[in-house]
Image: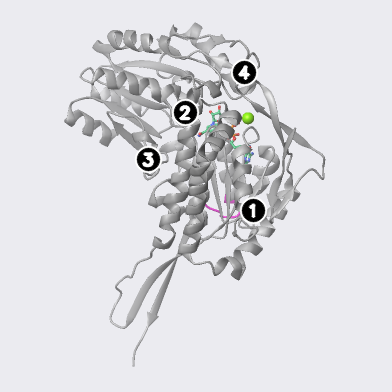
Amino acid sequence: MKQIPMLINGEWVGNETNEWLPVFNPSNGQQIAEIVRGNKEHVNAAVAAAQVAYERDEWKKVKPFERGQLLINLANHIRENAEQWSKLECEDVGKPISQARADVEAAARYFEFYGGAADKVMGDTIPIEEGILNATVLEPLGVTVHIIPWNYPLQIISRSVAAAIATGNAVIVKSAEDTPLTAHALSEWFAASNLPKGIFQHVTGIGPDVGGPLASHPNIQHVTFTGSLKTGVSVMKAAAENVVPVTLELGGKSPNIVFADANEERALEGVVRAIIQNAGQTCSAGSRLLIEEGYKEEFLSKLTTKFNELTIGPGSEDYDIGPILNKRQYDQIMKKIEVAKSDGKIISGGEAITIDGYEGGFYIQPTIIDGLEHGHSLAQEEIFGPVLTVFPFKDVEEAIRLANSTDYGLVAGIWTQNIDVAHYAASKVKSGQVFINNYGAAGGIQMPFGGYKKSGIGREKGFVALRNYTQIKNIAVKFSI
Ligand code: NAI
Ligand code: MG
């Protein structure tokens, strides 16, 4: 069995406790590797190493453009070996290989983008008065912690780690217990690079054992977390004890708002892709369809046809929909589908399926639920599977009211040919990203991403995310002769 060690202070740290956790391929349920069950001592060692590495000249004297070059080298390495990286991610997460390939290219783009930005992180000069030169300098924070979920591990590690290293921090990655493979591959690359030891570290294990002690550690300066609302709140509370800032990305219940005048083919395709990507295990999934009342039946009948044409199977064979991560995730999705069967109406899918030769994988049909009250928990909470809930609206005001009536506010899609309606709705929707006549804009890594309301705090991606990993020092110089 492939054993995956942690990377702490430039050393591969293995099983001195002899406790390992299995890692499975979701497509067939077979074990593919095992990771170290990390603990608080590992966390303390990693934080101590990061503190030392961060302060040493070996890192401090690396010029910003040199940090950038290192990241760009990594981007090139990822591109040159894209197929190997894609296979790792496909095997680890279960996602269709073409989606894994897109994730790998996104990861390369993050390292390239933030690598290019490393020497362009600039402060301001601010006019005060004659005889005073006032300038701001953006300094790194120090030790930054990156707690990663299992749904897009490589992309999510890359987006925050690239920005944090570009700005001169020391990073500690805590990968999700289910999906450590690409985090480990990055560790191998960093360990072999000329990055000083302790600047990139990787710890593994169960959330409360490792992520908890990291978030509450007094000697860290920032936590970036993507995952569930509940865990995000606990991370924020832990960090609050030490007045450590957090960047949180906590999911959503994102609406696709379809008006009767929408370009039908584009809207259908957009609504389908927004909910089936990564089998719906996506923070920004378009999991609520809000549809104009008079158009509802027609649109739903065409949507159902599209859903019925979708293919399901193992990630390596690149069907439209891959497996669900594990039994726990599968059980919680199926439980919600069962609730929908009694409280609403299933108009497509609704069943688990078995794939010949892949009986150990957990597969669920793409499912459309109609007939729920909008206040129902299935309309309010993440299902995190290929499950779409549908609600009609009378007019644009009702569409906006429904769109905004969950605790979340990550993404919204608006589908209409009417430019006034499109912009009016975009201005009223409470979400961090709004897409008009598309959903996701191909995932552009340049676009700020993050949530209103309980979808999170702060923004990742784009230039703006560099600010997460810097602090402002204002320096005023008084001069006279
Ligand atoms: P989770 O939020 O518990 O796990 C995310 C990461 O946090 C993992 O690395 C985990 O090890 C770590 N973690 C767990 N407990 C921790 C703690 N007490 N302190 C610090 N770190 C901790 O999410 P989980 O259990 O994997 O998935 C449950 C649900 O969360 C999903 O069904 C979905 O609704 C949501 N989720 C949302 C994601 C998003 O993209 N926003 C990603 C993954 C899950
Ligand atoms: Mg796995």
**In the rendered structure, which segment of residues is drawn in magenta?**
240-245
Q: Amino acid at mark 3?
A: Gly
Q: Quadrant of residue 175?
A: top right
Q: Secondary structure at mark 3?
A: loop
Q: Is residue 39 above or below residue 92?
A: below
Alpha carbon separation for disc pair 4 and 1: 34 Å
* x then y, percent, for residue 221: 57, 56
**Nearest to N terminus: mark 3 or mark 4:** 4
User: Could you tell which of marks 2 and 3 lies nearer the N-terminus?
Assistant: 2
Crowding near the residue tagged with mark 3, few <14, some 14–19, many ≥20 C-alpha atoms within 10 Å: some
Amino acid, disc 4: Gly
Could you tell me residue 12's position as x and y percent? 72, 49
Chain-order first, disc 4 or disc 2: 2
Picture coordinates of residue 222 (x, y %)? 55, 53
x 60%, y 63%: residue: 54
Residue that carries the numbered disc 1 in the rendered image: 191
**Tag of residue 361:** 4
Quarter of the image for residue 60 reads bottom right
Which of these two is toward me, 186 or 473? 186
Alpha carbons under labels 3 and 4: distance apart: 31 Å
Task: Specify the label residue 98 is tagged with.
Answer: 2
Q: Is mark 4 within 8 Å of ligand 2?
A: no
Question: Which corner quadrant of the figure contains ligand 1?
Answer: top right
Queried on whether the Cβ of the residue with tag 1 lies below 8 angstroms from ligand 1, the answer reads: no
Q: Earlier in the sequence, mark 1 or mark 3?
A: 1
Kind of residue at disc 1: Ala
Prevailing SS of the magenta stretch: loop
Q: Residue at x 61, y 57 (%)?
A: 199
